[in-house]
Image (cartoon, coloured by chain):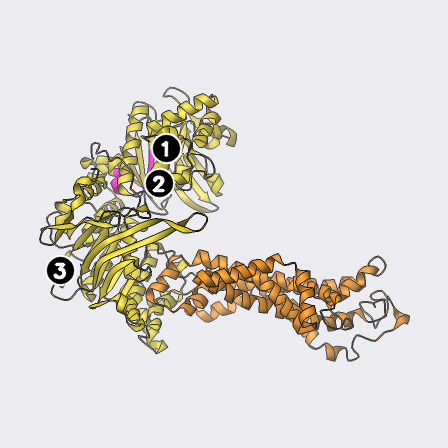
Amino acid sequence: MTINALKLERFKSFEFIMGALLVGGIGFAVLFSGWLFPDGASGVNLAMRLTPPMADGSFPLGTDPLGRDVLARVIIGGEISLKVGFYSALGAVVLGIVMGLLSGYYGGVIDMIVMRFADVQLALPFILLAITFIAVIGGGLSNMIILLIVSQWVQYARLVRGSVLSLKDREFILSAQAIGVRDWRILFQHLLPNLLGPVIVLMTLNVANNILLESSLTFLGLGVDPVIPSWGGMLAEGRTYLQTAWWVSVFPGVAILLTVLGLNLLGDWLRDTLDPTGRTSR
Amino acid sequence: MSSTPPLLSVQSLDIAFGSHRVVKDLSFDLHAGQTLAIVGESGSGKSMTSLATMGLVHYLNATIAKGRILYRRTSDSAPLELTALSDKEMRRIRGKEISMIFQEPMTSLNPVYTVGDQITEVLRLHGDYSRATAREEALRLLRLVRLADAESLLKRYPHQLSGGMRQRVMIAMALACKPKVLVADEPTTALDVTIQAQILAIIKDLQKELGMAVIFITHDMGVVAEVADHVVVMRNGEKVEEADVATLFAAPQKPYTQALLAAVPTLGSMQGEALPRAEPLIIFDGEKVVTQGEATLQDTVQVQQTPVVSVRNLVTRFDIHKGFFGGVSHRVHAVENVSFDIQPGETLALVGESGSGKSTIGRTIQQLQKSTSGDIVFSGKPVAEMSRAEKMTLRQQVQYIFQDPFASLDPRKTVGFSIAEPIRTHRLMGDERRIKQRVGELLERVGLSPEHGERYPHEFSGGQRQRICIARALASKPKLIIADEALSALDVSIQAQIIHLMMQLQREEGLAYLFISHDMAVVEKMSHRVAVLHLGQIVEMGPRQRVFDAPQHAYTKKLLSAVPVADPHHRREHLLLEGDIPSPIRRVGDEPTVYPLDEITAGHFVSRNGASLRS
């Protein structure tokens, strides 16, 4: 089999197609939300408050307690949620991988500093950290993302460090050292690909978690202006109406669910494609 | 023997994983008091057969597709069909009537229970013992397997015992209920030769004392010749040949057996020869025996030139941190005052048992390990005084091959990438096309084809992977290759091919090898000079012929006498080798005595501590 045929083959998997459809579809809708809903999602219409889905042609997913279109709010709200979810997870992964690789591979003083810092980080309750953070730096979208990165890189660093410790005594790492391969190549060409699997899984889980955390942080006043919709925020808002108007919170929930499902599928696919041992067995 | 019905009879047995048959139509009989050896290379189905007699195959998700295993408690009782028994009934036979010992004594004991707890558990499970009588019996069993100080041993945990002691505990447990059949699956493969000799002697003695029948699973023809009465040779799940041991070794009938026996390196085969000799390869091609190449003398040593590497008074120690404040309380004295030279084109073998420091020497030369003191001189310059660039050159000209070909290639990189890595690292070529071409050439050099470069390591067999590792080592055009137990993980027929390849490369490229091995027979075949290590010190060093034909040091003699010889007529009558391998770990301040070497004939050095060693 030639390399090209192999490459095409890799994309013909259920995980990739479903995952790409879900994440791509949601991403596409969110990206073009301004064009889809030129009026935005802030059009208050108390006369139409809590309209059930499909009851009125112009509100296919119903309206919220202020009579705003749930569909428009879900799509426009995706922007904040996806930004927070992705950027924070990505930032935490990059920082965590670099710190984990360095501390696991070199050990000694670097390891001690990174790991003691990680212990402190883990001992600190998240809410306490968040409140301190707001008090010192203030709120806003980018600050929220920074906060999430700061609180989550530790998980990745520990995961990566653990894998490095078990991998670095394996003979293929020793033999790379014996050849004289430079350290950064050993770190990023040999160690990183071999430990990426669990990191990807953890990351897909964290994206979902962060989308939800955004709403609690917004509640604390750290997030964006509460008027701007987000999935987490809508979930929280709809909670009081759950008995009478389920659609207010269920649809943003479905949006989160589909995004996470899509990401998980893509994550599994990525993990499997990166692993040459799994490729031929399919 | 044929007059009495067999104790255990395997009849046209088929074992399968799904539709994949791993054992095909296998039949053999085991008589009371007999030792039956099942030999074969990896994938021959020998271990599956042993598990089947224990009724354990379904735990591995395999099934017995066909055939039966009959077991007779006494010669006149009706046979019991083991394959038809329920799990519950089988459990009553397993351990009590048919017992098993496994290859890995390190993992087959539970680390959180004492030895005593584990033996008494077996006893009380199968027999009518009280706590006190079980303890008495456990003591008796430990003495039976020649473990001194059995009393204190009962209270110890597995990690406090050496590998040989653990395997003896395993045997004691297997014998706990006086089984009629003992199944031993590679029981000595993970052990050093001297310990292997002890274990084999114990199994043989106990068999005589207790009248057990033993099924001995092994890949080692030397062990077969040592212990077996009757041999079944297996290949790809099928029985190739069955004969009593003398007949099999004297006149193997089937081509596969002939090729297998020809591939076995036999200690003493090079007696009287000054130079190593590359033997023609005898290969079984699936139907018949093919001979490749011809015997060539390995006259490659260039004595006049400066040595590739000189090691001078090398000392390597590791600190062990213990206690609350993490202070150094003990040290591993891995290498103590070792000196030697390697000439271009020469193979110097480092032999010794585990903990003798042979691998540490290799790793220190390769700069994978810092030395405590002493010099490694490379191209006339001590490594300690080298600049970064010179150290890089060292890493280009000295290459390392590891024991495990499965672990020493990055599973996420193509084989081509791995082979090209030394070329890229040392910037030997810039042009990608030429690198690719060179990788192809290297693959052909070691008997593979250029297309293999695009595949991943898991797509190759163990022997092919070791070839790939050799190709990788050749990529940077080295002068010296350190082969650290590079042949130990391979089947004998593959081993013979790799030896052939390494010797061929030595003739053609003028390579020097530092050949680190515990296998004396392979060392005898390959090396020009031999250094015997014991507790980090060289106890004897000299030309191979001198060391093997006329060993001077007690330890060398002991090591050579422990090697099983693949010839049933040379069975050793009880050369009892007592004692464990001593540990190189010592308390801080308790430095070992370094013994000077005396040159007894030209180039043959013997340590002065010869008398102080137990022999």
Q: Quadrant of residue B123?
A: top left
Three-letter code, disc 2: Gly
Query: Which residue bears the numbered disc 2?
Result: B163
Three-letter code, disc 3: Asp
Alpha carbon separation for disc pair 1 and 3? 47 Å
- Residue depicted at x 32% and y 30%: B148
Most foreground residue, A270 or B324: B324
Three-letter code, disc 1: Ile
Q: Earlier in the sequence, mark 2 or mark 3?
A: 2
Secondary structure found at label 1: helix
Q: Which residues are magenta?
A: B215-224
Q: In the image, B435: left or right of A98?
A: left
Query: Which residue bears the numbered disc 1?
Result: B171
Image chain in orange: A
- Residue depicted at x 30% and y 75%: B428
Q: Which numbered dot is residue B299? A: 3
